[in-house]
Amino acid sequence: MLRPFTRLHEPLAFVRQFTPNWFAMIMGTGVLAQVVAKMPLLFTGQMLLAEGLWWLTVMLFGVFSLLFAARLLLFRDTLWPMLDHPVQSMFLGAIPMGLVQVINGLLLFVVPLHGAALVTLAHGLWWLALVLALGAALGVPYLMFTRQKHVLETLTGVWLLPIVAPEVVA
């Protein structure tokens, strides 16, 4: 089970407490970068701002991926509590959706400058995002029915995150 809040003084407590909901931030910054890049109203520095937002997205995705991987490797006892948690588990769909924002920015900002060879990288990352999205879309609802306790009174839009992930990847 996750450590109580009083244990946050232990080393690497921030890794133990890191949850997948942080990947929703990546979804937001990535989409914002694309919107700024494609706005019909042009302004000075528009592409510079858009690309800067995308690089922020890439940095956040890298840091959050490392933190999440470290949590799974260093604190294996937190895996099942996270999967059993009625909110944390829903955000597993945000991981592939955040990766899609990295892929879209790669195609929008990097491929025009560095050539089509990076399209192969984007294609490989897309397959990874697809596998992660399908895992979330199939696994989390299964856990909702078999292990978690949900009632109609607690229904929120967060329930859509795992099943929307394949649509975003598509």
Image (cartoon, rainbow, N blue to C red):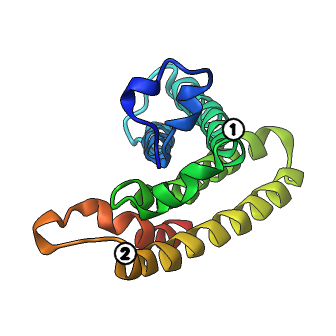
The Cα–Cα distance between marks 2 and 1, rounded to whole angstroms, is 27 Å
- Find residue 138 and report its horizontal and vertical position in percent: 51, 80
Side of 40 where 134 appears, left or right: right
- Find residue 92 and report its horizontal and vertical position in percent: 50, 58
Label 2, secondary structure: give it: helix
Tell me if residue 115 comes above or below residue 126 in the rendering.
above
Q: Earlier in the sequence, mark 2 or mark 1?
A: 1
- Find residue 63 and report its horizontal and vertical position in percent: 64, 32
Of 74 and 122, which appears nearest the observer? Answer: 74
The structure residue drawn at horizontal position 59% and vertical position 56%, both measured from the top left corner, is: 100
Side of 151 where 77 appears, left or right: right
Label 1 packing within 10 angstroms: few (<14), some (14-19), many (20+): few
Amino acid on which the number 2 mark rests in the picture: Met
Query: Mark 2 or 1, which is nearer the eye?
Result: 2
Q: Which mark is residue 144?
A: 2
Tell me if residue 2 comes above or below residue 139 in the rendering.
above
Tell me if residue 10 comes above or below residue 53 in the rendering.
above
- Find residue 124 and report its horizontal and vertical position in percent: 79, 63
Q: Which mark is residue 66?
A: 1
Looking at the rendered structure, the number of numbered marks drawn on it comes to 2
**Does residue 47 show up?**
no
**Does residue 53 show up?**
yes
Amino acid on which the number 1 mark rests in the picture: Leu
User: Pointers 2 and 1 in contact (CB under 8 A)?
Assistant: no
Side of 130 where 20 appears, left or right: left
The structure residue drawn at horizontal position 46% and vertical position 72%, both measured from the top left corner, is: 140
